[in-house]
Amino acid sequence: MNNVFKILKFARPYLSNVLLNSLFNLLSVIFSLFSISLIIPILGLLFGTIETSTIESQNISISNIKASLYHIINNILIQYGVVTALGFICGLVAVGTILKNTFRYLALYFLTPMRNNVIRDIRKKLYTKILHLPLKFINQFKKGDIVARMTHDLHEIEWSIMSVLELFIKDPIHIIIFLISLLYISPQLTLIGLIFLPITAIIIVQISKSLKKSSLESQNKIGELISIIEQSITNIKIIKVFNNYLFVSKNFNVHNEKLKKINNKVLWRKDLASPMSEMLSTLVLVVIIWFGGKIVLETELDPDSFIGFLAIFSQILPPAKSLTSAFYSIQKGSAAVERLLVLLESPNEINEKLQSTHQFNDKIEFKNVGFSYNNDLNISDVNLTITKGDRLGIVGESGSGKSTLIELLLNFHEISKGEIKIDGHSITDTNCRPLFALVSQETLLFNDTVLNNLLIGNSDASEEDIQNATKSALIHKVIMNLEEGYNTIIGPQGNNLSGGERQRIGIARALLSGSPILILDEPTSSLDSEANNYINQALNNLSDEKTIIIISHKLSFLQEYNKIIVMQNGKIIEEGSHNLLINKNGIYKQLYDNEKNIKNEKN
């Protein structure tokens, strides 16, 4: 329940809606009681037990409303007969019912926007939170699991919030007002009901204890299932090429079957709430009928008042029953809340709290930098200086620490040892990310227009800035030949474009950012020679003041770069220009010769 209250804090801005909902629920309950209470005078007419009141109609007040109503009914009975009096009471029932349902609709009318606004606000905060969480934290989750938390879990929370509102507003109002009327009719019978109803509630609570645990298992399994679906769609080409539908289907079916079994347990427990509460409530009603029958026979309680008591008491049972269902929903929703709070209550990146810098004037310095992840040594004693305007190539075999070195520079991970400084300022004291633009091996594009993908680099860029960037990246003509030019939707991950076109859009986006340092992580590894030449030409067109850091397996791509470092086992083992490293006849020379041999074999 504590977790649910944390989520309910999102309802504070909409307190006015909650108050209006409470007011109209109160009026709805009052007129519901008014309509049901009229069964007593109806029975009185039929049984002939209505007596003439001595209270005049002009003295009607809340304290003597029953006597006043009976006075009016008796006058109609004397003047117009029993049928007219019965018609008058039925008219009052109709009016009361109309007003009851009108106010009930108004209560729901003001509840709906509050409910949807709360879910919108939670979703908005959750999405923003995910964008600001550290990469290390996000990588603990599968993408499908995060999607499940923002969709399925939010749906569960929506109904949990509804249940809390029913639990604390509508149903208690209903029960309290009806109990007051029951006390007025027969305090003795009401006390009997108050003894047995809490017993039924305790039984329901005991049954529902394990529901939260099962719900948490269900939501975790849904996250796994969505992750499998997401991966299958992403890798659909691989599945089709290898024609291995049975293998991936078997994996999906195993998880799907587990989810079915967990959901069976959840729904069996949840569905037990309604029949269990109805059975227990009926037993309480039977006890009251037995005691009430004795009271009617032994005291002055009128039969019509007793039947009216039963009618009113029976109307307490539905809200009492819904209270138990609400409790089950809260238990189920609290599991979803727990999963969301894992994200919402996690700390943001420390980097975001630092003052940002946008100017690169001198140099980047790695001083004895070390980094380890999961007790594996990834980077060890790296010392490196990158001067403004340098074109630095980073080479080495897979797993040598090239990408990790870049991620440390971008402050995606906390350095275990040493420090990285930019213009003399430690990257742990200043947010240096505005200095960098990144082009990754697989260019990360959104299923949106070319224009919007470019504007991620600089949302304030003018049309001229955009075209200058795309022309520098040699992609402007390609974009203009698309069906809708810059407004063309490029598909998921830019699949409507070729690999070289996606990379050049990535370069154009990086250039549009205006960042002084451009980082490229294997930009040509999967491209053909023509696309490779386009990328090379685009980079050569850049200003000499632009600092370029590139990770590449294609050493021929780096021959004109003024500095190249060779990494092995997380260490820099060679450093220098292309010619210098060739003359050293070391690891770089071996890598270069291997590349030449592979190229000759292909030719």
Image (tube, rainbow, N blue to C red):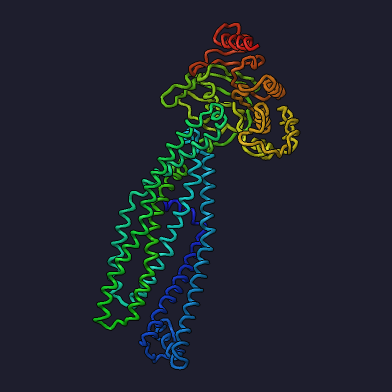
Q: Is residue 16 left or right of residue 526?
A: left
Instruction: Residue at 52% x, 47% y: name it.
Output: 123
Quadrant of the rendered image containing residue 542: top right
- Seen from the viewer's position, the closer of residues 89 and 142 is 89
Q: Is residue 48 left or right of residue 478?
A: left
- Seen from the viewer's position, the closer of residues 438 and 422 is 438
Residue 459's spot in the image, x, y percent? 66, 39
Instruction: Residue at 42% x, 36% y: name it.
Output: 254
Q: Is residue 543 visible?
A: no
Q: Is residue 340 above or below residue 44?
A: above
Q: Quadrant of the C terminus?
A: top right
Instruction: Residue at 39% x, 47% y: name it.
Output: 264
Residue 24's spot in the image, x, y percent? 49, 68
Residue 562's spot in the image, x, y percent? 64, 16
Residue 286's spot in the image, x, y percent? 29, 69
Numbered-mark total: 0
Instruction: Residue at 75% x, 36% y: name it.
Output: 464
- Seen from the viewer's position, the closer of residues 56 and 296 is 296
Q: Is residue 151 above or below residue 400?
A: below
- Seen from the viewer's position, the closer of residues 268 and 120 is 268
Q: Is residue 505 visible?
A: yes
Quadrant of the rendered image containing residue 219: top left
Q: Residue furthest bottom?
A: 79
Quadrant of the rendered image containing residue 539: top right
